[in-house]
Structures are given as C-alpha cells and as structure tokens.
Amino acid sequence: MTRVQTSVLAISGTMAAIGGLFLASRITSVSQSSGSGVLLLNAIAAAVIGGASLFGGRGTTWSAALGMLIIQSIASGMALTDTPAAVQFVITGGVLFAAVLIDSLSRRSQKAHGRA
C-alpha cells in the first residue's frame, strides 16, 4: 500500500511539473499567479462537469477529459463572440455551479433511496 501511494505521488508530481513547463512555454513567463484565474476555474469545472464529485469517490479520467472538451467549447464560443472576460468568468462559474448542484441533488436522491 505504501509503495502504491508513493508511486502515485511521484507520478502526480512529475505530471504537475510537466504541466508547469507547458504552461511556462505557452505564456512565455512565470510568476506566482501563473496557474490562477481562468486556468484554475476551467480545471475544476472540467472535472466536475465530467462527473467527478466534489464530495469524493466518483469520476474517471475520460469523463474529466470530456468535461474539458465541454468547457473549452464554451470558452471558444465566447471568444468567437468577443464576450468580455468578466462575463466569461460568470458563465463558466454558472456552469460549474449547475454541475455541483446537480451532483449534490443526485447524491441526496441516492442517499434517500438507499443507494449511497
């Protein structure tokens, strides 16, 4: 069990480092706030829309990838229509709120019916 946890942490750290390198090469600069803002909101929204629960225990890699496609499609559509950045945050936040609300209601329903 300890070997598995160590392996998972090592792989996770390596992937985070590779992601950081990709981000640094994309924005051609690095600061303490490089990973915040839209990037962080989109990452959380992609996981939640893909089916990962904020309450733990559910979700797959492929569903998170599907969630990212959905979030990126929404972002690309807003960019094409020249939607202001503030409105993009509100819309993405609204989609995230709806996904969390649906997840919460489905968990409550499953618990009420004894399928928790």
Image (cartoon, helix red, strand yellow):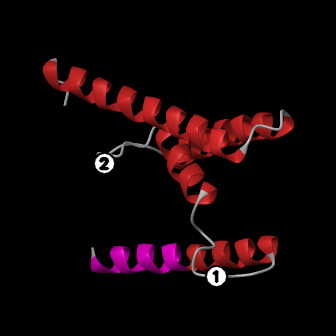
The mark that comes first in sequence, 1 or 2, is 1
Q: Is residue 11 magenta?
A: yes
Query: Can I make out residue 85 in this image?
Result: yes
Name the residue carrying label 1. 31
Residue at the far top: name it: 113
Q: In the drawing, does residue 72 fall left or right of residue 67?
A: right
Residue occupying image coordinates x 14% and y 20%? 112
Label 1 to label 2: alpha-carbon separation: 31 Å
Q: Quadrant of residue 30?
A: bottom right
The x, y position of residue 73, in whole percent, is 73, 36
* Residue 95 lies in the magenta stretch: no
Name the magenta segment's main secondary structure: helix
What residue does disc 2 label?
56
The kind of residue tagged 1 is Ser
Relative depth, front residue between 64 and 4: 64
Give whichever of 68, 1 is nearer the camera.
68
Q: Which residues are magenta?
A: 2-13
Mark 1 neighbour density, 10 Å: few (under 14) some (14–19) many (20 or more): few
Quadrant of the snapshot with the C terminus: top left
Q: Secondary structure at mark 1?
A: loop
Element class at badge 2: loop
Residue 13 vs residue 113: left or right?
right
Q: Amino acid at mark 2?
A: Gly
